[in-house]
Amino acid sequence: MNPLATLGRTVGYVCMAIGGLQLIGGTRVEPGMDGGDPTVDSHVRFMGSVFIAYGLAWVSVGSAPQPDVTRMRLLAGLMAAGGVGRLITRATLGRPHRFHDVLLATELTAPLVVEVVARRQP
């Protein structure tokens, strides 16, 4: 099996699962969120649906026999852009819940993982 395809599908299914949890559970499923704020809950649920769509894009690229590396790099870059957004929050408002440290590390590492796996392809 193609490691790049496996990576794409795995990332996609994980993103879809996270998005589904956010869509259904709102702020209750994300550590550090204030569950009593309807504006924040509405935003989390909306972003959950966007994250499901983002996951579908990863699954789509990972479902090809030979995944489109350019498209995977774009998706990984979008994930890194989310990490940059988290860095802006840290710089302007302070450190969020420690769970977001894991998310930040994942988001900034994604392009590197895609690149390493892509370069190891024959």
Image (tube, rainbow, N blue to C red):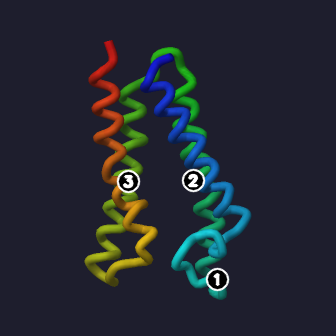
Q: Nearer the viewer, residue 2 or 66?
A: 2
Q: Nearer the viewer, mark 2 or mark 3?
A: 3
Mark seen at residue 107: 3
Look at label 1 and name its amino acid: Gly
Residue indicated by mark 2:
51
What crowding class fits label 2: few (fewer than 14 Cα within 10 Å), some (14-19), or many (20 or more)?
many
| Callouts 1 and 2 close, C-beta under 8 Å | no
Residue 64 sits above or below residue 106 on the image: above
Where residue 113 appears, x then y in whole percent?
33, 38
Residue 100 sits above or below residue 71 on the image: below
Look at label 3 and name its amino acid: Glu
Look at label 2 and name its amino acid: Phe
The residues bearing labels 1 and 2 have C-alpha atoms spaced at a distance of 20 Å
Q: Residue at x 34, y 75 (%)?
A: 89
Q: Please report whichever mark, 1 or 3, sits nearer to the chain's N-terminal start.
A: 1
Residue 28 sits above or below residue 48 on the image: below
Q: Please report whichever mark, 2 or 3, sits nearer to the chain's N-terminal start.
A: 2
